[in-house]
Amino acid sequence: MTEKISQTTTHNLNYSDFTFQTYDKIRYADTDRQGHVNNAVFSTFLETGRVEFLYNPEHPLADNDASFVIANLSLNLLGEIRWPGTLEIGTRVTRIGNSSLTLQQGLFQEQRCVATADTVIVQMHDTTRKSHPLSDRCRAFLQQHMPSPAQEASRDE
């Protein structure tokens, strides 16, 4: 069974909409000659949030004989990121499938959404290299990070 929420329009997103929150430091080396963070680095910031969410050593989500792999990543660049400073990274689950999940992430600088991404992640069996069903424990954790229908309805108004 697949559980899914509707996609929120990007202009309505706030950092507080995300159930999992972390941050990263913007490095001078992340900038390009225009003085803003290079667009390739946006994916690295998203990785910070994704890895902290999926690979928490205290609460591992992947089965012992499985790993998470990215099947699709859709990145929307909405604004510039400027050095110096920090970047807030929000992550939440928008879909839970049999062996896959979809994460929605937002990057925020000074409370302004500068990028969003939707990432489809598949749990893959390490030996067979085929998709591997998500465990009940994993599904329960992921469900906790899905916005409620009421939250979604209020964001779309």
Image: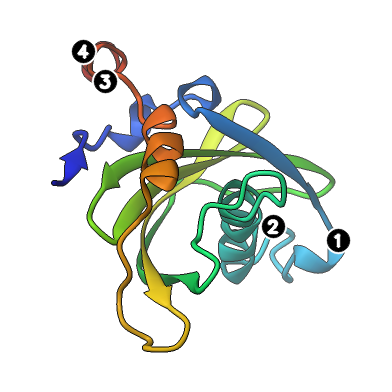
User: Label 1 sits on what residue type?
Assistant: Tyr
Q: Residues within 10 Å of mark 1 (few under 14, many from 20)?
A: some
Q: Secondary structure at mark 3?
A: helix
The kind of residue on which mark 2 rests is His
Q: Tag 4 or tag 3, which sits nearer the N-term?
A: 3
Using residue 32 as the reference point, say whether residue 101 is left or right of it.
left
SS class of the residue under badge 2? Answer: loop
Q: Which amino acid, mark 3?
A: Glu
From what the image shows, is residue 4 above or below residue 25? above
- Which of the two discs, 4 and 2, labels the residue nearer the N terminus? 2
Circle 1: element type: helix
Q: What residue is disc 1 on? A: 28
Residue 36: mark: 2
> Which residue matches tag 3?
152
The residue indicated by pointer 4 is 157
Q: Residues within 10 Å of mark 3 (few under 14, many from 20)?
A: some
Residue in front for this viewpoint, 156 or 99: 99
Q: Point out the frontmost of discs 4 and 2.
A: 4
Q: Secondary structure at mark 4?
A: loop
Q: In which quarter of the view is residue 37 placed?
A: bottom right
* Mark sitting earlier along the chain (3/2): 2
> Callout 4: 10 Å neighbours few (<14), some, many (20+)?
few
Q: How much space separates mark 3 and mark 1, taking CA atoms?
A: 36 Å
Q: Nearer the viewer, residue 11 or 120?
A: 120
**Disc 3 or disc 1, which is closer to the eye?**
3
Please name whichever residue, 157 or 59, is drawn nearer the observer in this view of the structure.
59
Q: Which numbered disc flags the more N-terminal residue, 3 or 1?
A: 1
Q: Give me the C-alpha separation between circle 4 and circle 1.
A: 39 Å
